[in-house]
C-alpha cells in the first residue's frame, strides 16, 4: 500500500481516538454537575451508568459483524458523529426517568465507535508493520484530559456544566467528518475476500475460546479499573475528600494526563520490554495507585487531595498500556478483526461500563472507599490473567509489538 495512504490513515485514526476520548471525558468530568442538577444519589447514578453499559455492550456485539461486512472505514463514518450527537440526550435530560431512557441511546453510540476505531487501528498497524496502537489510545486519553481541563475551566468561570455537554454534542459530530476522510481506502472486493479467507484460517488457530476468555478477563479487569477512575475519581474527591466543585474534576484529569503520557510512549516501551512484561508491570502500578487512593483520607487534611491525585496518577500509568497490548495481540492473530475485536472489546468494556455502575450500588450499601476496593483487586487481576494470555498468544503468532522494525514516519 502507498506509504502516504498509511500516513493519512494514521492521522485520521488519531483524530477519531481524540474525539472519542473527548466525548467520554466531557461526560465523566460533567458527572458531578449532572448529579447535583438532577439530585442523584450513588444508586441512581449507578442505574444510569448500568443502562449506558447495556446499550454499549449490545452495540459492540453488533458492530463487529458490521465492520467485517461493510469495513471499519464505513462504520467509522456513521458511528463517529452518532456517538457524539447522542451526548445531547443525557445533557438535556430534565428528569431522572428521561436520563435513564437517553442513557441507553448514549451507550449505543459509545459501543459502535469503540469497535470501529479499534478495528481500523489494527488495520493501520498492519500497514506500518510496527507498534503504533498505544499512541492511538494515548490520543484518546489526551481527548479525555482536554475535556477535563475544559470542564474545570468552564465551571471556574461560573458557567453550568450542562452548557459544555450540549456544546460538545452539537460541535463534535462535525469534527468527526474530516478525520474519517483520511482513513484507509476500502480494498477491492476480490482482494478483501481472499484476505478474509486466509486470515480466518489463521484466526481460528490463534484465538481459541479459552484464550479469548483469558484475554477477555484481563481486558475486563483493566477496563473496570479504568472505568472506576473515569466515573468516580471526581466524585471521590468531591464526596470523600471535600474538594470544591471546580477542583473535583481535576482528580480525573490527573489520571487522564498520566495515562496519556504513558500511552504516547507505550509503543517503544512495548518494543523494548515485550508485551508480557509490559502488562505485568501495568497491573502492579495500577494496584499501587488504588491503594494510595484508598489511603488518602487517612493522611493529614492538607495533603489528602494531593495523595489521591498521586494515586490516580499511578493508576493511570499502570492502566495505560493494558488495552493497546491486548488489542494489538488480537489483531496479530490475523484475518478480519471485527468479530474477534468485538468479542474481546465487549468483554473488556463490560468492565469499563458495568463496573462503575456496580460500584455505585456498592457505595450506596457501604461507602465509596469500600466500593473502590473492587477496582484495586481488578488491577491485580490484570497481571494475573494478562501475562499468561499474552504469552500464549505471542507464542503462536508474533505481534508487531514483539517484532519492531525501523520507524517510518
Image: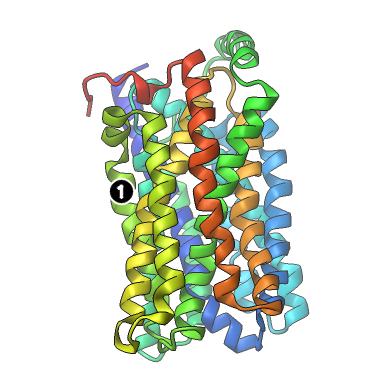
* Residue 206 position in % (x across, y down): 58, 16
Q: Is residue 80 visible?
A: no
Q: Give the quarter of the image for residue 251.
A: bottom left
Dot 1 crowding, Cα within 10 Å, few <14, some 14–19, many 20+: many
Q: Secondary structure at mark 1?
A: helix
The x and y percentages for residue 265 are: 27, 42
- Where residue 374 appears, as percent x and y from the top left, is 59, 61
Q: Does residue 389 appear to the left or right of 312 in the view shown?
A: right
Q: Is residue 345 visible?
A: yes
At horizontal 53% and vertical 33% (from top left) the residue drawn is 119
Q: Quadrant of residue 250?
A: bottom left
State which quadrant residue 151 falls in.
Answer: bottom left
Structure colour scheme: rainbow
Residue located at (39% from left, 91% from top): 158
Depth check, front residue: 224 or 120: 224
- Does residue 143 appear left or right of residue 212 in this picture? left
Query: What is the tally of numbered marks visible in this picture?
Result: 1
Q: Nearer the viewer, residue 52 or 347?
A: 347
Q: Is residue 202 above or below residue 185?
A: above
Image quadrant where one finds the N terminus:
top left
Percent x, y of residue 399: 42, 21
Residue highlighted by disc 1 = 262
Q: Is residue 173 above or below residue 342?
A: below
What residue is rendered at 39% in x and 60% in y?
Answer: 289
Q: Residue furthest bottom?
A: 158
Q: Is residue 98 above or below residue 354?
A: below
Q: Residue at x 68, y 71 (%)?
A: 362
Amino acid at each position: 500500500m502507498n506509504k502516504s495512504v498509511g500516513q493519512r490513515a494514521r492521522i485520521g485514526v488519531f483524530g477519531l481516538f481524540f474525539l472519542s476520548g473527548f466525548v467520554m471525558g466531557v461526560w465523566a468530568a460533567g458527572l458531578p454537575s449532572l448529579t447535583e442538577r438532577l439530585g442523584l444519589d450513588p444508586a441512581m447514578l449507578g442505574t444510569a451508568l448500568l443502562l449506558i453499559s447495556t446499550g454499549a455492550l449490545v452495540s459492540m456485539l453488533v458492530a463487529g459483524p458490521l465492520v467485517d461486512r461493510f469495513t471499519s472505514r464505513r462504520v467509522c463514518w456513521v458511528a463517529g458523529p452518532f456517538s457524539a450527537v447522542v451526548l445531547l440526550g443525557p445533557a438535556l435530560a430534565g428528569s431522572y426517568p428521561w436520563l435513564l431512557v437517553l442513557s441507553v441511546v448514549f451507550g449505543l453510540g459509545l459501543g459502535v465507535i469503540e469497535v470501529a476505531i479499534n478495528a481500523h487501528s489494527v488495520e493501520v498497524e498492519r500497514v506500518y508493520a510496527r507498534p503504533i496502537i498505544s499512541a492511538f489510545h494515548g490520543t484518546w486519553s489526551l481527548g479525555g484530559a482536554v475535556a477535563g481541563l475544559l470542564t474545570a475551566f468552564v465551571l471556574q468561570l461560573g458557567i453550568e456544566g450542562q452548557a459544555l455537554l450540549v456544546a460538545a454534542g452539537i460541535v463534535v459530530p462535525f469534527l468527526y467528518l474530516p478525520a474519517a476522510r483520511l482513513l484507509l481506502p476500502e480494498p477491492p472486493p476480490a482482494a478483501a475476500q481472499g484476505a478474509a479467507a486466509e486470515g480466518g484460517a489463521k484466526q481460528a488457530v490463534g484465538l481459541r475460546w479459552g484464550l479469548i476468555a483469558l484475554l477477555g478477563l484481563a481486558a475486563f479487569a483493566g477496563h473496570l479499573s479504568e472505568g472506576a477512575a473515569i466515573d468516580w475519581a471526581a466524585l471521590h474527591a468531591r464526596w470523600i475528600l471535600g474538594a470544591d466543585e471546580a477542583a473535583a474534576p481535576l482528580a480525573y484529569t490527573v489520571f487522564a494526563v498520566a495515562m496519556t503520557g504513558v500511552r504516547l510512549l507505550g509503543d517503544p516501551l512495548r518494543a523494548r520490554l515485550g508485551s508480557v512484561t509490559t502488562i505485568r508491570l501495568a497491573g502492579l502500578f495500577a494496584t499501587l495507585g488504588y491503594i494510595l487512593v484508598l489511603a488518602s483520607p487517612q493522611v493529614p487534611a492538607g495533603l489528602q487531595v494531593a495523595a489521591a491525585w498521586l494515586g490516580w496518577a499511578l493508576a493511570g500509568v499502570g492502566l495505560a498500556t493494558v488495552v493497546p497490548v491486548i488489542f494489538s495481540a488480537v489483531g496479530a492473530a490475523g484475518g478480519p478483526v471485527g468479530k474477534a475485536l468485538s468479542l474481546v472489546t465487549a468483554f473488556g468494556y463490560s468492565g469499563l461500563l458495568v463496573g462503575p455502575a456496580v460500584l455505585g450500588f456498592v457505595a450506596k450499601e457501604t461507602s465509596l472507599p469500600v466500593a473502590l476496593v473492587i477496582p484495586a483487586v481488578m488491577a491485580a487481576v490484570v497481571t494475573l490473567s494478562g501475562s499468561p494470555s499474552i504469552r500464549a498468544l505471542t507464542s503462536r503468532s508474533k505481534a508487531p509489538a514483539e517484532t519492531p522494525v525501523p520507524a517510518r514516519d
